[in-house]
Image (cartoon, rainbow, N blue to C red):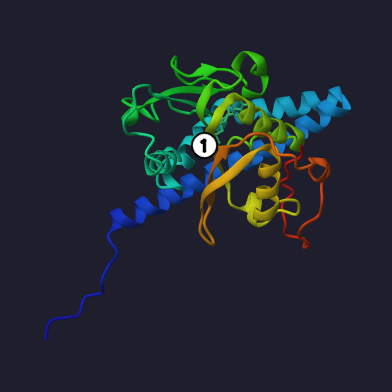
Amino acid sequence: MPKSRKKRTPITHSTKSRASSSRSHSSRSVIRRFHVLLKRRAQFQATRSSKELVDIENQIEEMGGLERYQQMSSIGQGSDRGGGSEKVLIKWLKDHNLNVNRHIKIKLLEVGALKPDNYGSCSSWIDCTPMDLRSRHPSILEQDFLLLNENEHFTSWDVISLSLVLNFVPEPKDRGHMLRLAHSLLVPDGYLFLALPLPCVSNSRYLNFQHLKALMTAIGFLELRDKWKEGGKMVYWLYQKRTATHISLDNFHKKVSLRNGNRRNNFCILL
Ligand SMILES: C[S@@+](CC[C@H](N)C(=O)[O-])C[C@H]1O[C@@H](n2cnc3c(N)ncnc32)[C@H](O)[C@@H]1O
């Protein structure tokens, strides 16, 4: 009788999956650490504590600065999400028939662009402006979105993408400003694409799906689509610009506790 042989897992398979999971684990920890430092830097900037500020700047420098953060983010973009967010946005724009019968291309502003050609496959109908705080390619415009001149760029874009950018901004009021600025830079009926790590809304003390919807409505955005799954990492939304609503912004000026418990995060957006 032939000896029964134990079935082995192919070495190539196990090595590859372990390597890629440890790569994405270490990229996530760099990203998390970077966000913590950005938040502390913003706090010390507000209190003008120059000694602490220098200390934080040094820590950011030692980590490799924004360059390292961007490298780690591009690893996360591939391995954690099965590709970039642009796939979701392209599908949604096609679902809204924005790719058909176009005499003029859609003007898309991609804020937080790690690559220059995320929308290259749609160049026949999308005219993309990739922008980032730190440009990794000559075709990426190096520009802080928050410092764009509102009057100069008023209603300049048909679509604005903020994928994993809002959670990079450390101050809740600056996040609110980013959303309001996006509203004013879009054409009437233009589209805003927003992507966040799911826990920013599913496990925050100060934000849940309902509150975000109310805040976006108050700014003047109609929620058209969302995409996420229980236990998933990401959440995506598509909003359409509507004319200003008469809803008061008062409910969104201060942090309001929406969930209790120790294991919550403090992600918050204020107007
Ligand atoms: C986590 S990466 C996200 C990249 C990509 N959009 C994605 O979805 O994977 C965040 C990027 O946003 C950029 N960013 C953050 N705040 C910005 C701002 N105010 N203006 C322009 N770019 C910004 C950062 O420099 C960084 O490259």
The residue shown at (66%, 42%) is: 216
* Above or below, 188 relative to 35: above
Q: Is residue 26 left or right of residue 256?
A: left
Q: Which of the 4 image quarters holds residue 94?
A: top left
| Relative depth, front residue between 226 and 143 | 226
Q: Which of the 4 image quarters holds residue 205?
A: bottom right
Task: Pinpoint residue 201: horizontal percent, then vertical percent.
Answer: 65, 52
* Above or below, 1 relative to 90: below
- The reply to whether residue 68 is visible in this rendering is no
Task: Pinpoint residue 71: horizontal percent, then vertical percent.
Answer: 50, 32
* Above or below, 241 relative to 23: above
- The reply to whether residue 28 is visible in this rendering is yes
| Relative depth, front residue between 258 and 30 | 258
Type of the residue with mark 1: Ser
Q: Is residue 48 left or right of residue 113?
A: right
The residue shown at (76%, 34%) is: 173
| Relative depth, front residue between 250 and 230 | 250
Q: Which residue is mark 1?
A: 73
